[in-house]
Amino acid sequence: MSYTYETQYNSPNYQKGRPAGAPAFIVIHHWGIDGQKHHNVVSYLCRKGGNSSAHYVASAGIVTCIVDPDDRAWHAGKTGNPRGIGIECRPECSDGDFRTVAELIAELRKTYGNLPLVGHKDHMNTDCPGRWYPRLQELSNLANSLKGGTSTPAPAPSLDLEALATAVIAGKYGNGEARKRALGANYQAVQAIVNKRLTGKSKPAPSVNLEALATAVIAGKYGNGEARKRALGANYQAVQAIVNKRLKG
Ligand SMILES: [Zn+2]
């Protein structure tokens, strides 16, 4: 994510827990008046004895969490509060605002699953969320594409490997050791495809390129610890073994 994430502001305006069940949707709000400053909105929603709050205040490059999403903030009434996660967005809805909110949604969906987006007006008689309302589908799509880019990077190799195999067969990678050097980490997977195509033998081509995954892990694209484990799934042990071997030299 490319925004600053703040947790030092806490709203007292919420109820503990989610007795009706885990968060089931995200309620998009706007804070209503153009020109209002992010942290003034944070202060207002964190006021003592207030009757409103949200889980997040978000604008270009900054997200402030003021109520834990596992608790109920007060933002969308009787139908919205029990299972909704409320995000207060900057009403101007600039490209930067839009991007940051999409990144926040992508993060939330990693934790809570593919939560749908609704507008405040879907739960109460209000104009909120203004300019955001006609763009909820677009916002949802952008969030999903961001989520795909960071948490479930289906390794592209399967396509690339097929293309490499075609190039190998066309003679573009030479033979023997030269081919091995030219293909590097892809050699075994590509050669398996080549063999299969040329001989019809069904030596199963690996469905993922573990060497390429290991390279991505070392480049930091799969995070650390549990996050990496989750992201790599069934490939974790095999990939981690390659990573360990390479890093040990
Ligand atoms: Zn609202």
Image (spheres, grey):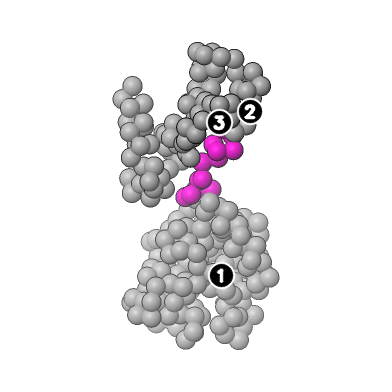
Answer few, some or many: residues within 10 Å of disc 1's Cα (few below 14, many 20 plus, some between 14 and 19).
Answer: some
* Residue for point 50% across, 13% down: 177
Give the vertical position of 58 relative to 188 (above or below). Answer: below
Residue flagged by tag 1: what amino acid is it?
Answer: Leu
**Is 91 displayed left or right of 241 in the figure?**
right
Local secondary structure at mark 2: helix
The label shown at residue 25 is: none
Question: Magenta stretch?
Answer: 149-161
Q: Earlier in the sequence, mark 2 or mark 3?
A: 2
Residue 61 in view here: no
Q: In the rendering, at what x and y percent does residue 87 appear?
A: 51, 69
* Residue for point 56% across, 70% down: 117
Tell me the residue that label 2 is attached to.
166
The label shown at residue 117 is: 1
**Is 191 displayed left or right of 168 in the figure?**
left
Q: Earlier in the sequence, mark 3 or mark 1?
A: 1
Q: Earlier in the sequence, mark 1 or mark 2?
A: 1
Give the vertical position of 42 relative to 164 (above or below). Answer: below
Mark toward the viewer: 3 or 1: 3
Residue 167 in view here: yes
